[in-house]
Image (cartoon, rainbow, N blue to C red):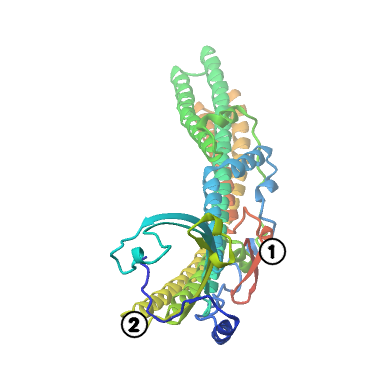
Amino acid sequence: MKSKTRTPFLRATITGLTPGRVRPLALALSCVLLTACATVGPDYREPPPVDVGSGWTLPLASESQSADLSQWWSALDDPVLDRLMATALAQNLDLRQAAARIDEARALRERVAGEALPTAAAGASVNRRRQSENGPLPVGSIPGLDATQTIYDAGFDAAWEADLFGAKRRALEGASARLQATEAEAQGIRMRIVAEVARTWFTAVGARYELHAQRATLDTLQQTFELVRLRHALGDASAADVEAAYAQWTAVNALIPDIQARQRTAVLSLGVLLGAPPERELALLDGPLTPSTLRALPVGERADMLRRRPDVLAAERRLAASSADIGVATAELFPKLSIGVGGGFQALSTGDWFDASSSRFSILPLISWRLFDGGRVRAEIRAREAAERQAALAYEQAVLTALGDAERALGDYHGGLDTLERRGMALDAARTTYGHTRTRYAAGDIALVELLAAQRSLHEAETAAARAHTNAAVQLVALYKALGGGWDVSTTASTATHPLRGAAAPVAFSSR
């Protein structure tokens, strides 16, 4: 942004001030400072209340007590998942980038805070020069004044711009709010990484379960194949029966490489999420199966969820920053006061450098006021006001999006648990049916086609049950994510209020 031209109407430079001369100046400056204490622009107010409704739409969420979701994965009793989470939270590259962005935002806030303080600089110089004897200063005719001179100078300069109308205060408010928004966004990234690690791990575990089911089916089909071959040798089964049993065995065997590939892909993805080469966790391919406990989740009130969602928190902080920007722009309509002070020693000889007669001092108060700018400041104010309206709408959208995400995740998980229960019942029935059918076939009471049909039903039931468990686990992860789980709201420091109708409560933020 180009610097804006200021039109000064008062400029005073005073050197060699006496107490009698300083007193009127100090009095005048004090009057200006005392009469210009207002902070222009709007004070930040809560965003318009967003109606969050009367409650969740599913009975799954009927419990009023919310669970601790900061480390929700620990409730699954999976030590491997616990280890993966700890590693990812320490080494994930997205999280490390988010931490760097927080450092950047904190540094920018400190820079804004520093702009309200005086600046001071010290320096020294040696200036060797020759003046013209024919110039405006008759060097040659003044005794003791040589045309060639060496000037030794040392001293300091200080400057300060008074924050008469709160431009710097508003700028600091905006920078602080943006820092808090960046911290909330970083927590959102943390929440996403946690969910992605869990989802990928459950995908790998689900593939293991499916692979286990397929191999169990292969064992069953192998036993059937051997039984059919025995009966064929005894003359009780035809060659076609043997071929049919073998064909079913080969069909199931052909499915295994695809399952193994899906499992390997998931494990390789875990390595990247952990901030390491993809092959880091390949040993998990041969690890023991660790079943995860899936249960109904007490999610608490809708407003509790909204206070946990980092995207909602970040949107509210962006709104606060936009409100502060209006004050920064409005302050450009009013006068500015700056004061410069300088002092030191100046002499033609280093021996006279620190004599009292070589000292110098100056004070420069400057009041400037933009009288005409073609409407640029007022246009900037209107632009900032429009940006604030956008931020308010973005906040409302973030609230409604969070509600939609949570409701969908609740519905999906509710359906996933129901499907898992029904698949389990179907698997039990298929196992019972297969056991009876195999006994009857061994006794010669039924044909092979009935046995193969029972085996196919058992195979399908086992595969469906394994996939239902995986889907439910992944849906549970999505639910935790939608509820804002994966970070601890209580670890933050500063407080803001979110105006959710019927749910106004403090929300913690980190501010430094």
Horizontal and vertical percent for residue 105? 53, 58
Q: Write down the residue under mark 2.
A: 372
Whether residue 221 is situated above or below residue 499 in the rendered picture: above
The spot of residue 366 in percent (x, y) is: 46, 77
Depth check, mark 1 against mark 2: the one in front is 2
**Residue 63 shows which numbered tag?**
1
- Residue at 45% of width from left, 74% of height from top? 388
* Observer-nearest of 430 and 487: 487
Report which quarter residue 244 is drawn in.
Answer: top left
Q: Residues within 10 Å of mark 1 (few under 14, many from 20)?
A: some
**Amino acid on which the number 2 mark rests in the picture:** Phe
Q: Mark 1 is on which residue type?
A: Glu
Out of 239 and 261, give the one closest to the viewer: 261
Spatial distance from mark 1 to mark 2, Cα to Cα?
63 Å
User: In the rendered image of this protein, does residue 332 appear above or below residue 254?
Assistant: below
Q: Of 417 and 5, which appears nearest the observer?
A: 5
- The x and y percentages for residue 104 are 52, 54
